[in-house]
């Protein structure tokens, strides 16, 4: 179909999809049984709205050229418990399946997408998957730090310190500290030092990020309690 007819068909299809999603949203709100389920329903409705908007955007812009929008959608799906949809969205952005690819091509892609994939992997709750995600996050920190150093050397004229990658590196360091803390219920001197370093690096990469400072303060309090119980 070409010409005006194709245009009218596209518009009609879009209207049908929009009306269908709107009906689903109304049903989702009206169908809630307990008041406490409202937050979950609201998130579910939001994800439905995102889904139809992304479907329209994908008609003119492929996901690989709209990474941030699709990454946020994957995050929303993960937080809403729609794990399989989060995974399929991230695989679409990576353009390969890390779980089904040879070892030499696993976990390669844009840093922000890789961090999102590792968060998905961690959310599965499996101990092996979490340890694997943490090990890969350690590698991601090293790779990302090296790339930032190369960029800073190549562009010495930039002295404002407003590199767009810095907040992402702060988030990576924050997750590194949080995950190691979770995997180290029995703190020892080595793990304490590594976790403190990760949280400190997060605050240094994003000096105004409250979440990083909160984690840094919270862990310092936990360390003080740990040493107090040991009689130090």
Image (tube, rainbow, N blue to C red):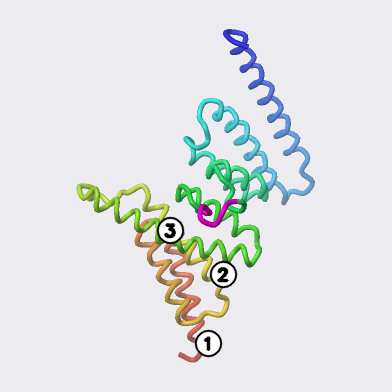
Which picture quadrant has residue 204? bottom left
Q: Is residue 35 visible?
A: yes
Mark 3 lies on a secondary structure that is helix
Left or right: residue 125 compared with residue 110? right
Q: Which residue is mark 3?
A: 210
Across the whole image, how many numbered discs are drawn on residues? 3
What numbered label is drawn on residue 162? none
The Cα atoms of the two marked residues, 3 and 1, are separated by 29 Å
Return the x and y of residue 42 as percentages of the image width and height. 66, 43
Magenta segment boundaries in residue numbering: 101-107
Q: Which residue is mark 2?
A: 182
From the viewer's side, name the closer residue of 17 and 133: 133
Residue found 58% across the figure and 51% down from its top: 101
Mark 2 lies on a secondary structure that is helix
Q: Are marks 3 and 1 in contact (CB under 8 Å)?
A: no
Return the x and y of residue 19 as percentages of the image width and height. 69, 25
Left or right: residue 66 compared with residue 20? left
What numbered label is drawn on residue 229? 1
Residue 148 within the magenta-colored segment of the rendering? no
**Of label 3 and label 1, which has the lower sequence position?**
3
Return the x and y of residue 52 as percentages of the image width and height. 62, 31
Residue found 65% across the figure and 37% down from its top: 48
């Amino acid at each position: 179909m070409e010409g005006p007819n194709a245009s009218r068909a596209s518009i009609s299809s879009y209207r049908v999809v929009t009306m269908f999603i709107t009906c689903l949203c109304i049903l989702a709100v009206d169908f809630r049984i307990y008041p406490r389920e409202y937050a979950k329903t609201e998130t579910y409705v939001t994800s439905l709205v995102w889904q139809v908007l992304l479907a329209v955007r994908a008609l003119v812009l492929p996901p690989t050229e709209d990474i941030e929008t699709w990454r946020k959608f994957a995050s929303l799906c993960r937080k809403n418990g729609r794990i399989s949809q989060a995974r399929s969205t991230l695989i679409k952005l990576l353009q390969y399946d890390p779980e089904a690819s040879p070892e030499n091509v696993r976990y390669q892609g844009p840093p922000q997408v890789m961090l999102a994939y590792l968060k998905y992997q961690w959310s599965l709750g499996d101990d092996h998957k979490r340890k694997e995600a943490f090990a890969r996050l350690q590698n991601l920190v090293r790779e990302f730090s090296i790339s930032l150093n190369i960029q800073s050397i190549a562009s010495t004229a930039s002295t404002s310190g407003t590199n767009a990658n810095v907040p992402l590196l702060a988030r990576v360091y924050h997750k590194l500290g949080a995950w190691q803390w979770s995997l180290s219920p029995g703190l020892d001197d080595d793990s304490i030092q590594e976790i403190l370093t990760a949280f400190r690096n997060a605050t240094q990469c994003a000096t105004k990020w409250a979440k990083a400072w909160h984690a840094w303060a919270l862990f310092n309090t936990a360390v003080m309690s740990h040493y107090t119980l040991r009689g130090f």
